[in-house]
Image: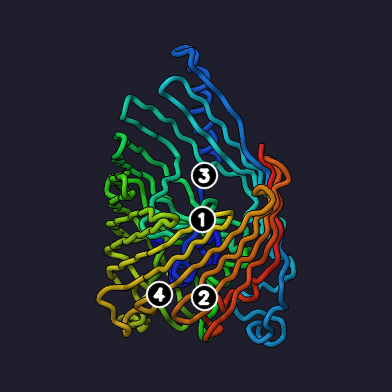
Amino acid sequence: MKKVCSLKFNSRTKYRFGRLLNSCASAHSSIQKNTIFAAALFCLCTLCAPVFSQDTGFSVSGFVDTFHSVQLFKPDKISSGGGGQPVNDADNWDRQILDSRTRVRMELSAYADDCSVFISGNASYDGTCKSRTEIELKEAYADWTYGSFGIRAGRQIIVWGKADGVQIVDIVCPLDNTSLTGSDITDQRLPVNALSFNLRSDMLSFDMTAIPVFTPAKMPQKDNPLYGVLFPSYSSGNKMTWNEPEEVRFSLKNTEYAIRLSAWLPFADLAASFFTGNDDIAVYDMKSDASGITLSGSYERIYMSGLECAIPLSDFVLRGECAFIGGRRFSGKKWEVLPDGSMLCSPVKKNQIRALLGLDWNRGGWTFTAQYIEDIILAYDEDEISRKQRIPAATLSIEKSFIHDTLTLNFSGVVDINDYDCALYPSVKYSVNDSINVKCGAYVYTSGREDSSAYGRMKDASCAWIKMVYSY
């Protein structure tokens, strides 16, 4: 469904992961068509620019990074079926090396007077998961500005909100949920094919966006350890068969729209936003018969109204966000008997409120960030919805820089307040120079009250990791 210490509060978080457990989808993009489009756009702008203007420019940048992780603990043989044979696919991460992947990012940009073009793409190799080895077009868009008015057309990433790595009002772009470790929400955001208009002054900005082509969240394939968690083959002894979600076809009716008004005032930064479109994670109908349970997914229409603010208070910054999400579907619990004798359990349509309150402090190389998150279903009935009404969570981030900011120690964490399961992310980063940095750390998951809690199910994925980045 659409949808602590420099915290990367992303798909590892309980509220997000809970949605993934209940409603998952698989999405594939046409790399060949996107690459042809990007190349044509870039060549057109760079070749024609000198004809219209002498004020032109061109740049190439990017990075190469490599990430590797090793399991900290041996898999729980009880959850593995008692004899090392998993009872729920690969959800116990029954291997020592969890990740081993390398990525090359290239970014190309060109401009001529009031026009510009930007293209970025990745070439990735994953030695532990073949489905994550790919060449992908990230962004490819053209900009045109005239005074205070601007237009952007193409594949673009749209970021809303004041939260640190948390999606509250930031729901325009879906996420890449194929990796549990080694990526933050910045890496996870997927571009949308959109046409955006912007009208800006010194204190105000008004944005309108139309997204004619739906982009779903990217879900793990069968060779990915996350697949067994999100798409279990068995539940309570029943075989589960997952069908591909129904495709959202290109049409005016399925076009997504987003509007945002931002204000930068002397005492605060404020914004109000509205979005209507399809939830980027599918929700599933469950049909049970003698052969097991068959799940059929669809991307349902929702709308969102959001408010956000950031208020400076001396050395502190107070941040807040609130979103009302209407028409969201949640996995149901009630089964009805069909005429053929089978049983059907359908998602339940409800309204939802998600909110965040955060506090930041920065002085003398110390950075402190704390956030409290609420996720509430309105008009809740525990007999018809499988998830809890409230999913409160808290995050804490503490970071300290040393040796002229070349060495950074960081400790991040998130706790689910319902079950007290948590995820801890200690790390150390050393910048060799402006181009090279090395980072190492750990992901540690604890179960809290129940092993079946979101982070409890991830405890076998606890790992130590190292990441190296070269920027050019």
Relative to 110, is 142 on the left or the right?
left
Q: Amino acid at mark 4?
A: Ile
What distance separates the C-alpha of mark 4 from that of mark 1?
Answer: 29 Å
In the rendering, at what x and y percent does residue 268 appear?
Answer: 32, 50
Q: Amino acid at mark 2?
A: Ala
In the rendering, at what x and y percent does residue 333 appear?
Answer: 36, 81
Q: Amino acid at mark 3?
A: Ser
The colour scheme used here is rainbow
Residue 182: image tag: none
The residue nearer to you, when weighing 44 against 295, is 44
Identify which residue is drawn at 29% across, 53% down.
Answer: 276
What distance separates the C-alpha of mark 2 from that of mark 4?
Answer: 11 Å
What distance separates the C-alpha of mark 1 from that of mark 3?
Answer: 44 Å
Q: Are marks 2 and 4 in contact (CB under 8 Å)?
A: no
Q: Amino acid at mark 1?
A: Asn
Crowd band around label 2 with a 10 angstrom C-alpha radius: few (<14), some (14–19), many (20+): many
Residue 362: image tag: 1
Crowd band around label 3 with a 10 angstrom C-alpha radius: few (<14), some (14–19), many (20+): few
- The earlier-in-sequence mark between 4 and 3 is 3
